[in-house]
Amino acid sequence: MIKSKINVTLDKMRSYSSVFSSTYFSRLLQYDDYTFIDIKIVRYDLSKIGKSIKTYYDYIRYIYNQLRKHYRNEYIYKNTFINELLIDTYGIKDTVAINEFRVGNSIADIVLFNGTSKAFEIKTELDSDKRLSGQLADYNKVFKECYIITHETLIDKYLKADESIGIIELVENPISLKMREVRPAKENHEIDSETIIRSIRTIEYKNIIKQYYGDLPEMNSFNMFNICRELMKKIPVEQLNTLFIEQLKKRKSNTTIMNSFYKEIRQIGLAMNIDYKTYQQLLGKLNKPIRIKHHVLSVS
C-alpha cells in the first residue's frame, strides 16, 4: 500500500514536471493553447480551482512548489540557480547566460560569460554520474571555470571529483531552496581551439579570426572552416580565450531582464530567450482565470 502510494506520487510529480517545457510555453504564446496545463488540473487538482488557485499563474506556482518539495528535477535546479546565484551573486548586468551549450560530445546545462567563462553541470538526486568525467573533460577544453551543482546530501560524493572543479550545493529550507558554493573552481588556463571552433557559430569563429589577424583570408564556403581552424590553432591561448568570451558576450540574451520575470518561470524565460515584450504577453496569458474547455474534460 505504501509503495503504491509512493508510485502514485512519483507519477504525479513527473507529470507536473512536464509542464515546464519551452515547447508548451511557445504553443501558449502562439496559439493560446492551455491544454498542457488544463490536463494536469483536470487529472489532479480540479477541486482546488476557484479556492486558493484562480489563475493559470497560481497553478504554475502551486505545481512548482510541489516539485520543489517532492521532485527536484533539472528544471528546479536551473531555476534555483538563476534565482540564487545568477541574479544575486554573479550579477546580470554584464553577464550572458546560455541554457544548454554544446561542447564536444556533451551539453553544459548552463554557461555564463562575463569577464570569464563558467560551465555548470547539474547532478540532481535523480541523476546518474556515469557520464560525468567525460562531460567535465569536454567543458575544461573551453571554459575557464567548471562547476558541479548537486544536492547537499551528495556533496561528499562529488567532492571526490577533480579538485579543479567547483562544487555548488542545493540546500533545502522549509519554504525555499538555496544554493551555496562549497568549493570554488580553479581557473583553467588551457583551452582547445579545435573544441572552440566546433562549439560556436560560423560568424563567431570568423569574427575571432578577423579580430586577431586584422582581416579574413580569401576563402569560400567549402574551405572556410578548415582555413579558419588552422588559423585559430596559431592564436595564443590567452588571446584566443579573450576573443572567444568577447564573441559569446555579443549573443542576443535576455539575462539583463531576468529579475523582472516571475521567479518560477525564469528558467523557461532563459531557455526561450524571450524579450521583455514577449514576457509581458506571456504574463497576460498566465494571469487569466482558469477556464477548462469541454474537450479537455472529456479527454481526461
Image: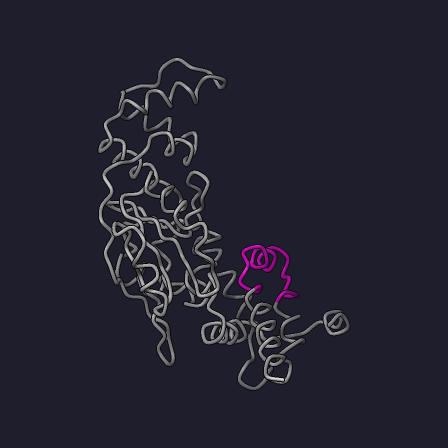
Is residue 28 magenta-colored?
yes
Q: Is residue 21 left or right of residue 251?
A: right
| Figure disc tally | 0
Please identify the dominant SS of the magenta region.
helix
Which residue sits at x=32%, y=53%? 161
Image quadrant in which you'd find residue 5: bottom right
Q: Which of these two is toward me, 296 or 241? A: 241
Which color mode does the image show? one colour
Q: Is residue 184 left or right of residue 64?
A: left
Quarter of the picture containing the C terminus is: bottom right
Q: Which of these two is toward me, 32 or 37? A: 37
Quarter of the picture containing the N terminus is: bottom right
Eyeballing the image, is 133 above or below 245?
below
Q: x and y percent of residue 7 in the render?
A: 60, 75
Image quadrant in which you'd find residue 48: bottom right
Q: Is residue 272 left or right of residue 169?
A: right
Q: x and y percent of residue 207 in the render?
A: 34, 28
Which residue sits at x=25%, y=45%? 116
Q: Which of these two is toward me, 182 or 131? A: 131
Image quadrant in which you'd find residue 117: top left
Q: x and y percent of residue 290 in the render?
A: 61, 75
Q: x and y percent of residue 36 in the render?
A: 63, 65
Which residue sits at x=54%, y=75%? 59
Q: Which of these two is toward me, 144 or 239? A: 144
Which residue sits at x=68%, y=74%? 292
Q: Which residues are magenta?
A: 18-36
Eyeballing the image, is 92 above or below 140?
below
Is residue 121 magenta-colored?
no
